[in-house]
Amino acid sequence: MAASHDEIAREKLEEAKGYVIETIAETMDVYGVTPAAGKLYATMYFKEQMNLDEMREELGMSKPSMSTSVRKLQENEMVKKKFQKGSRKHTYAAEKDFFHSFMSYFCQLWDREAKMNMEAIKHAEFTLDQIFEDENVSSELIEEAREIYEQLEQSKVYYRWLERLVASIRSEEIYEFLPKNP
Amino acid sequence: MAASHDEIAREKLEEAKGYVIETIAETMDVYGVTPAAGKLYATMYFKEQMNLDEMREELGMSKPSMSTSVRKLQENEMVKKKFQKGSRKHTYAAEKDFFHSFMSYFCQLWDREAKMNMEAIKHAEFTLDQIFEDENVSSELIEEAREIYEQLEQSKVYYRWLERLVASIRSEEIYEFLPKNP
DNA sequence: AAGTTTGTAAAATATATATTTAACGCATTG
DNA sequence: CAATGCGTTAAATATATATTTTACAAACTT
């Protein structure tokens, strides 16, 4: 038949996309999303745009699952809402620039880690200071407190570095050191 | 009583450590470990070394839980086994250099992501090549395949960047661009 | 070699997370 | 303003993950 070549080609095309979709979905756990969201992003990666019903259809999953998945992906800036006139349905498009997803996700992650720990350290150092202020505390305890204090100070070096890393990624300065395409 | 000042100081010391332990444990999900492993690492962070029974005692959890947690932490190179003569018990020490943990964990993560996706892309491009080789495929399909091919080529830029990032962290070159202590 | 101690594997339980089904509210349309 | 369509929330179910209990094997002790 006449269409045979095209049919085979179509199959191969879908097969080729299939490999990549499967693997992207598999490695999406890195970005802290559910399996459904992983499959969804991977699927959208090869589409111009999709609405919730198309997602449901394509993945064979429930609509609320698509709804929550797409929201999570939006939080990570891996999916953007597209404003589409005429239709009442919301349409979404995958962010295809992996650099952007990397930036958005890891910066958020590290920011949180650095901020929370810096805050805890501040708290802890404040409490330790109260020990140092008391003249009647034994030198053994003072020494022990001083060691902890020192350890906390040391760990701040890391958290500050993390914050600078985040800043250099957000500002894209990092690409001066490590070009996208060397 | 005479010990009162020391007792208060001891309390404050434990309180200070407590803040930090709690927060480290909380942010350890970043490193893909269970709550038990998170608490364990955070606890060990303020100890010279610990054996399984001390961990069980300190955290009030079962020994197998400590055993699996400590193994997971070893995989991430956040805990090292110490060889201690005389005792039959295995003892472990927390890696206190967060830079090392960062390096070990994220490099492992990104390496896997890059390798798996590069492999899938290779596979997919091989399959797409078969479409291009067939003279009888419609130009529409060829065009569609070419677009996918182009998209895959583009994504390789990111995965290669990720690999270079990993290399620059492992080699510590990154600290030339972003010093630990500027 | 029998008896302990230590660490871990396997099975059972508990807990948390993901997904679906059912139901609701809002906006748009006829 | 009733009726329909769309997205989301809430409750129910299913699934996966974490932890404990039980059981065992290896290494050491006596």
Image (cartoon, coloured by chain):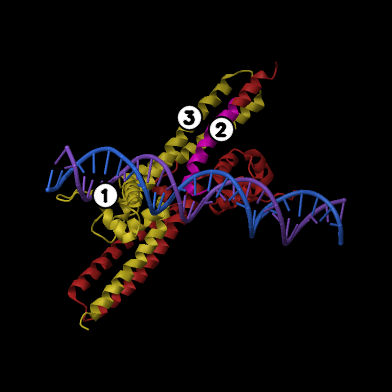
Chain colours: A red, B yellow, C purple, D blue
Residue A174 against residue A154 in the figure, above or below: above
The image quarter containing residue B110 is top left
Magenta region, residue range = A12-34
What is the magenta segment's predominant secondary structure? helix
Instruction: Verify whether residue A13 appears in magenta.
Output: yes
Chain bearing mark 1 = B
- How far is disc 2 from disc 1 in space, using C-alphas? 41 Å
Do circles 2 and 3 both sit on a common chain? no
Q: Which residue is mark 2?
A: A18
Chain bearing mark 3 = B
Q: Which mark is residue B80?
A: 1
Residue in the image at 41% along x and 55% along y? B35
Residue in the image at 33% along x and 71% along y? B15
Do circles 2 and 1 both sit on a common chain? no
> What secondary structure is marked by label 3?
helix
Chain bearing mark 2 = A
